[in-house]
Amino acid sequence: MNKLLKAIFIFLLFFILSSCVFDRIDKRNLMIYNNSNKIIYSVISSNDSIYNLGNFDDFVYKGNYIYTKEGDIKWFGFTGINPKEKTQSDGGTTKWDVYFESIDDKKIRLFIIYKDSVEKYGWKEILSKNIYTKKYLFTIEDLEKMKWMIEYKGK
């Protein structure tokens, strides 16, 4: 009998704890469809600056990754989106409603950056000088209407 009660208790505890975790996960994924003929990167921001990490010299830029100088810990990575492909946008959030509420004007910025630009300037210069190909502003209502799918058609 003790084993049965213990098993029921563990099951209930697991159920309660997992309910709390799953309640915090937003099932809406922002997808970017690249309908252009170039490889692109997408970056989400809460303001008109692509980069919100602080001092640019505090990080090391290697390829498509940004590392901390101490300990060589990967801080952020950029994933290219090939032509005619879609992917979940980098910079997603676990609770979109909370994220939008934290933004002054309630609009996210989606920056599109060509891979050619990254090869020409490098990530440090792109981020420090705010170099991008296209910038979109979206409210949460805009994204709901679009079913969380943004199509980039090219310039």
Image (spheres, grey):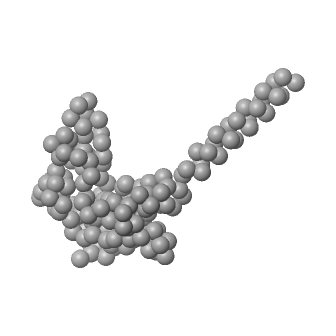
Could you tell me how many numbered marks the image carries?
0
Answer above or below: position of 12 versus 98: above
Give the camera-side residue of 46 and 67.
Answer: 46
Question: Which residue occupies 34% across, 71% down?
Answer: 137
Give the camera-side residue of 3 and 39.
Answer: 3
Q: Where, quadrant-wise, is the C terminus in this rendering?
A: bottom left
Q: Residue furthest top?
A: 2
- Residue 15, quarter of the rendered image: top right
- Percent of width and height locating residue 90: 36, 55
Is residue 137 among what the camera can see? yes
Left or right placement of residue 123 versus residue 143 in this view = left
Left or right placement of residue 74 versus residue 144 in this view = left
- Percent of width and height locating residue 94: 48, 52
Question: Which residue occupies 47% across, 72% down?
Answer: 141
Left or right placement of residue 67 versus residue 9 in this view = left
- Percent of width and height locating residue 133: 21, 69
- Percent of width and height locating residue 60: 19, 41
Q: Residue furthest front?
A: 104
Question: Which residue occupies 41% across, 58% down?
Answer: 102
Q: Residue furthest right?
A: 1
Q: Where, quadrant-wise, is the N terminus in this rendering?
A: top right
Is residue 81 among what the camera can see? no
- Residue 93, quarter of the rendered image: bottom left
